[in-house]
Image: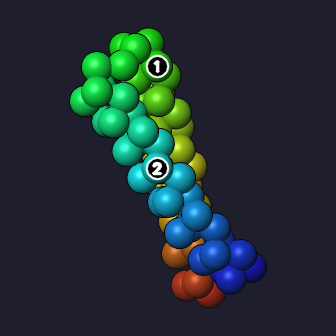
Amino acid sequence: MSGVFSSLVPMALAAVAIVLGLGLWNMMRGGSSSRSQTLMRWRVILQFLAVILVMASVYFASGQN
C-alpha cells in the first residue's frame, strides 16, 4: 500500500508546482486577476491533497497498518 502512495506523492507535488507556476506567470504578465485567483485556489486544494498523501505514505511506510 505504501508503494501506491509513494508513487502518487511526486505527481501531487508536480501538480502543485505546475499550478503555482501558471498562477505566477499569469500575474507577472498582467493577466486576468480572476484567473490568478482561481489558480491560487487550485494550488491550495492541491497542496492539501499532497500533504494528505505524504502523511498517508509515512503512516503506511512505518508499518502501523
Q: Residue at x 46, y 19 (%)?
A: 35
Residue corresponding to mark 2: 18
Residue 57 placement (x, y as % from top left): 58, 73
Disc 1 crowd rating (10 Å Cα; few below 14, some 14-19, many 20+) is: some
* Residue at 36% over, 19% down: 31
Residue corresponding to mark 1 = 35
Q: Amino acid at mark 1?
A: Arg
Residue 15, which numbered label? Answer: none
The secondary structure type at the circle numbered 2 is helix
Residue 42 versus residue 49: which sits nearer the camera? 42
Quick one: label 2 or label 1, which is nearer the N terminus? 2
36, 57: nearer the viewer:
36
Q: Is residue 48 visible?
A: no
- In the foreground, 11 or 34: 34
Residue 23 as seen in the image, left or right of residue 2: left
At a point 40% along the width and 14% down the height, the residue shown is: 32
Q: Are marks 2 and 1 in contact (CB under 8 Å)?
A: no
Residue extending farthest to the front is: 29
Residue 4 vs 61, above or below: the answer is: above
**Residue at coordinates 53% horizontally, 44% vertically from top-left?**
46
Give the farthest residue toward the left.
28
Relative to residue 47, is residue 63 drawn left or right?
right
Residue type of the residue flagged with mark 2: Ile
Figure quadrant of residue 1:
bottom right
